[in-house]
Amino acid sequence: MAAHINRGGGSRLSDINVTPLVDVMLVLLIIFMVTAPMLEQQRSQVNVDLPNVAAAPSTVAEDAIVITVDVGRRVYINDNQVKQKDLEVKLFHLLKTRARKEIFLRADQAVPYGDVVRTMAVIRKAGITRLNMVTDPLERKSGKTSRRR
C-alpha cells in the first residue's frame, strides 16, 4: 500500500481553538463581578452609622474629598484623621487648585447635631461652595440593595 503525500498547495488547518480564551474571559468576568461590589462598599475605611433618609443617590467623583465625623467625634479627611482645629487649613490647601470646590460630609447619626454644624461651619469657612451630606437610603433597611452615595 502506498500513502498519498500532498506536497503541493493543499489546505492547512487554520482554525483557532477559542476554548482557552473563553475560559480565561469567564474567569476574569467572575473576578470583576465579585470584586466590584466590594470596592464600592469599602471606599471609606472609617466606619460610621449613617442616618437613613429618603433621598436620591448622588454621584461621587473618584477624587472627591470626603469629611467624616465618627461616633467619637474624630474628624477624618478621606480616611486620614485630622484635628478639628487643623481642618480649615488642610481643606484650604487641598482645594485651592480645584475649580469645583465640593465636599461630601459623612457623620455618624449618634454625633450631636451641634458638632456636625460646627464641622459644617469650618468647611464653609475654608471656602467650600458645595457641601453634600452622605446618608443611607431607606431601602437599605428593608433589604433592597442600593448605592451608598
Image (cartoon, rainbow, N blue to C red):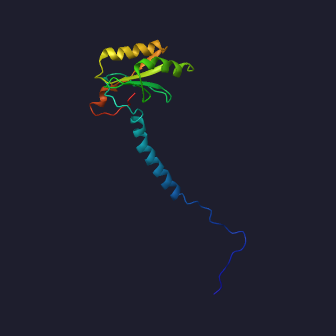
Please give the name of the residue rendered at 44% of the width and 47% of the height, measured from the top-left corner.
31
In terms of depth relative to the viewer, which is nearer, 140 or 65?
65
Residue at 72 percent across and 68 percent down: it is: 9
Say which of 49 and 33 sits in front. 49
Residue ID at (53%, 20%): 93
Q: Residue 105 sits in which quadrant?
A: top left
Residue 30 point in image, percent of width and height: 43, 48
Name the spot of residue 12 as percent of width and height, x first.
Answer: 65, 66
Quadrant where the N terminus sits is: bottom right
146 lies above or below 124:
below
Q: How many marks?
A: 0
Q: Is residue 97 above or below residue 26?
A: above
Question: Most extreme residue toward the left, as rendered?
Answer: 142
Q: Where is the C terminus found, in terms of image quarters? A: top left
Relative height, residue 84 to residue 45 (above, below): above
> Image check: 143 left or right of 34?
left
Residue 23 location (% of width, % of height): 48, 55
Relative to 18, is 44 on the left or the right? Answer: left
The answer to whether residue 142 is left or right of residue 107 is: left
Outermost residue toward the bottom? 1
Occupied quadrant, residue 124: top left
Note whether residue 100 is visible: no
Could you tell me which residue is drawn at 40 percent across and 39 percent down?
38
Q: Farthest right residue?
A: 8
Residue 115 in sight in this render: yes
Q: Position of residue 119 (x, y in %)?
A: 39, 17
Please state which of residues 7 and 122 is positioned toward the viewer in this rendering. Answer: 122
